[in-house]
Amino acid sequence: MKQIPMLDLRLEYQHMKSDIDTAIQKCLDHQKWILGPEVEELENTIAEYLDVKHCIGASSGTEALVLSLRALAIKLKGQEYFDKTDEIITTPFTFTATGDAILRAGATPVFVDIDPVTYNIDPDKIRKYLRSCEDEKMRRSETATSQPPDFSTFKAVGIIPVHLYGQSCNMDEIMSIAKEYNLFVLEDVAQAFGGTWNGKKLGSIGTTGAFSFFPSKNLGGFGDGGMISTNDAGLAELIRMLLKHGGKDKYNVDYIGYNARLDTLQAAILLAKFKYIGEFNERRLKIAEIYNRGFSNIDGVVLPANHSTSQPLNFSTSNYTNGHVYHQYTIRVNNGRRDELQKHLKEKGISTMVYYPVPLHKMKVFEGKCKMNGDLKESGQAVNEVLSLPIEPLQNENETKQVIDCINNYFGR
């Protein structure tokens, strides 16, 4: 039986080999390896694609998050880092980098539970948390002044919604909450390049957006890389300073900075691959729809939700509004059978992954450094039930059918 990987980067390279080889050769010819012309070209290309005023290349998606938060601290508070009393609300069901970036920026992560249908942060729970904070502060103000300040000294300053697996968060609700409470919104778009919400590209809606170009992403390089998007010229200028050691003049810097530039070679490769992003996202969507039909009505298996299942599959039009770009095709397996199914698929040569096996609030790094809103039971349940299946854009129908047949056979269908 044929082995089916989660992703076949060699196959993708062969598909676009001529474009990539030409891009690399161009770099070999000009030898401008640090902030070469391809970096600016990629920034301008993606800014136009997202319809934002500024895009800034970074060394990774993680650094894109950190740079955004550091710049926001400087702009909003006039200081290098946030304080521990500054709360940034995010999801516990994501990759470590999201919460880690908050700690690195000096703030306290507040983990709010997910919507069990989309796996994304639940806007209703964000609002309830903020209202509970208001109620608590009011209650404390009415009690004896000898009571320690504790909770009342903390204040939310921002939200980091993560568009997990390629599915957009409900950005209308999140932006409404942000406006009501005067919060910044940093979109974590690491898994959703090309995704949209109400016709707007993800990464163009919040205060800033952070993208990852890790090789496995929908748009991935041949190593680490990232991008920050924003319509705020002041933030863009600060980010450009921070990623080059903290100043416009590297010999006389203003802030504690980083060496976090996007490599010229990675920018060149990403430019070559960018022309395929619409085609590849559409291929992912079509594979997902084949899976959906193949797995319909299996008891104990929940298929991924898609805000836009009735929309056309053409990413080149504005009609595809709130859909999934399927960085991952992730099912839920109920009744404690997830691990057994994963073992069964492995025996049949089919790769799968669990994204993510441990929620952030249970990781050692966040012990004593985070706040939790409630018991986060939906996140706790998701980590035990989710399973991501192969969704390589160049995966053929026979391979997709093999996955479907193996899962149906496991469930006796």
Image (cartoon, helix red, strand yellow):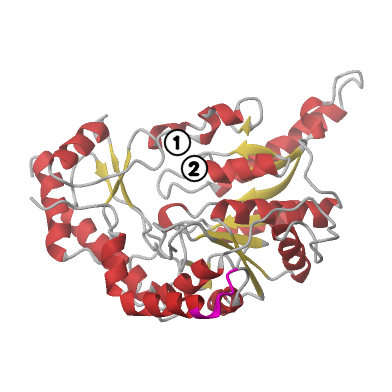
Residue 2 placement (x, y as % from top left): 11, 53
- Image height check: is 385 above or below 291? above
- Image height check: is 40 above or below 353? below
Q: Secondary structure at mark 1?
A: helix
Label 1, residues with CA under 10 Å away: few <14, some 14-19, many ≥20: some
- Quarter-of-image position of residue 315: bottom left
**Viewer-nearest residue: 209 or 300:** 209
Q: Amino acid at mark 2?
A: Ile
- Quarter-of-image position of residue 321: bottom left
Q: Which mark is residue 318?
A: none
Residue at left offset 68%, top offset 42%: 104
Residue 367 placement (x, y as % from top left): 61, 26
Callout 1–callout 2 Cβ contact below 8 Å = yes
| Residue at the disc numbered 2 | 114
Q: Amino acid at mark 1?
A: Glu
Q: In the image, which residues are magenta?
A: 29-33
Q: Secondary structure at mark 2?
A: loop
| Residue at the disc numbered 1 | 378
**Viewer-nearest residue: 22 or 82:** 22
Using the rendered image of the protein, determine whether residue 197 is visible from the camera's viewpoint: no
Can residue 31 be found in the magenta stretch? yes
Using the rendered image of the protein, determine whether residue 95 is visible from the camera's viewpoint: yes
Which of marks 2 and 1 precedes in the sequence?
2
Residue at left offset 8%, top offset 40%: 412
In whole angstroms, how far apart are the C-alphas of marks 1 and 2? 6 Å
Please identify the dominant SS of the magenta region: loop
Can residue 69 be found in the magenta stretch? no
Label 2, residues with CA under 10 Å away: few <14, some 14-19, many ≥20: many
